[in-house]
Image (cartoon, rainbow, N blue to C red):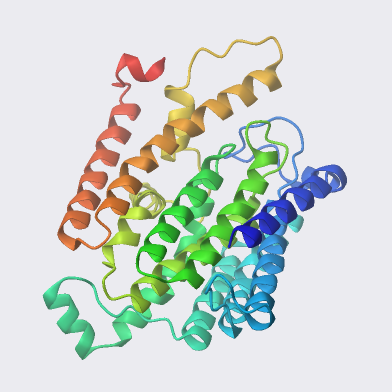
Amino acid sequence: MILLSLIAFVCATLTAAFIVRWARDHAAAYGHGMPQRFHHGDVPRLGGLALLLALGVSWLLGVLQSAYGGDPGSLRLGPWVGLWMLALLPAALGGIAEDMTQRLSVRYRLALTGASAVLALWLLGLQLPRFGIEWLDALLAAAPWLGWAVVLLAVTGMPHAFNIIDGYNGLAGMVALIVCLALAHVALQVGDRGLAALLVTTAAATAGFLVWNYPRGMLFAGDGGAYVWGVVIALASLSLVQRNGEVSPWFPMLLLIYPVWETVFSIYRKAVRGISPGVADALHFHQLIYRRIVRGVFHDDESRRLLMRNNRTSPYLWGFTLLTVVPAVLFWNNTLVLMAFCALFVVSYVTAYLAIVRFKVPGWLRH
């Protein structure tokens, strides 16, 4: 597992370096008037290509090692890993195509992530076996299609949830890294070493990308990177619950409540204003943090000042994420506690959002 992680890290780092050096021309296609743009200059948005290549190489070597090397780590990486890659490809390639052309509409990207969800159902047999609530479990037993619907919703929606929070250097990448390691930790706790290996290699590839993304912002993940993270994490979350009965289905829910609730809340506030959910805006939680909390950046160079404010925004959200990740890891098999923390997060998020909008932020948060 350590060797595969090292390979994923090196592959992602070197591929990202090549992109930074040779792929700047395509970056000019990204409009300067986009509301979610918080940087100067043309920065390549092909971090997803580096992630996808690193995962492909490390996962393939893991399968070959398990088949011909005696499987010393008891990872049992077999043909099912190839099926994961097949399920990942439609969403990942669609995101990369959008990053290169800026011409793939939200409708087509949603269709491609939906195709990944259908492949997950068909090739991997993914199913949500339980909700952890007695009456819902009884309903699920009577109507198994509800479990399929959850799989479709999770695999289709999670890539777009990561895309929404991908607004500042290191934000989505660090959230993905933390979530992958948390999922891997619980997978190891229940003895699912194969799943843990895929997650650790994903975290290592993400770390290789972050070498170029944070703090200097020389490469962005783009839609492709967000879709890679979203699909892999959705597949891993569902597989962990399906394959291990002791893991509460609310464990991945709490683990991912930040990007999930950010998406739900964004859809709600846009609907209230009569705006399509597919229209980009600058009112996400991380964007409000950037505008109204991050202070004290003084520099004569406007680009340098913008970069420094960009970099100072992400740590606020890393801390916010850890507030859910820590209890999720501690209580991964306790449904009631996990549900309580999910509710607490929703209340805390809405309270914090309203406080920032109304300029009622405590002074200590602005320093």
Image coordinates of residue 327 in percent, x first then y, are: 27, 48
Residue 189 shows in the view: yes
Image quarter of the C terminus: top left
The residue at the point 50 percent across, 58 percent down is 160
The residue at the point 62 percent across, 78 percent down is 66
Image coordinates of residue 281 in percent, x first then y, are: 50, 43
The residue at the point 28 percent across, 21 percent down is 360
11 to 198, vertically: above or below: above
The foreground one among 176 and 99 is: 176
Please state if 118 lies on the left or on the right of 354 as rendered.
right
Image quarter of the N terminus: bottom right
The residue at the point 64 percent across, 70 percent down is 59
The foreground one among 2 and 92 is: 2
97 to 265, vertically: above or below: below
Image coordinates of residue 209 in percent, x first then y, are: 66, 47
Please state if 352 lies on the left or on the right of 118 as rendered.
left
Which quadrant holds residue 216? Answer: top right
Count up the numbered dots: 0
The foreground one among 189 and 157 is: 189
Residue 103 shows in the view: no
Image coordinates of residue 264 in percent, x first then y, are: 36, 55
252 to 303, vertically: above or below: below
Please state if 76 lies on the left or on the right of 5 as rendered.
left
70 to 263, vertically: above or below: below
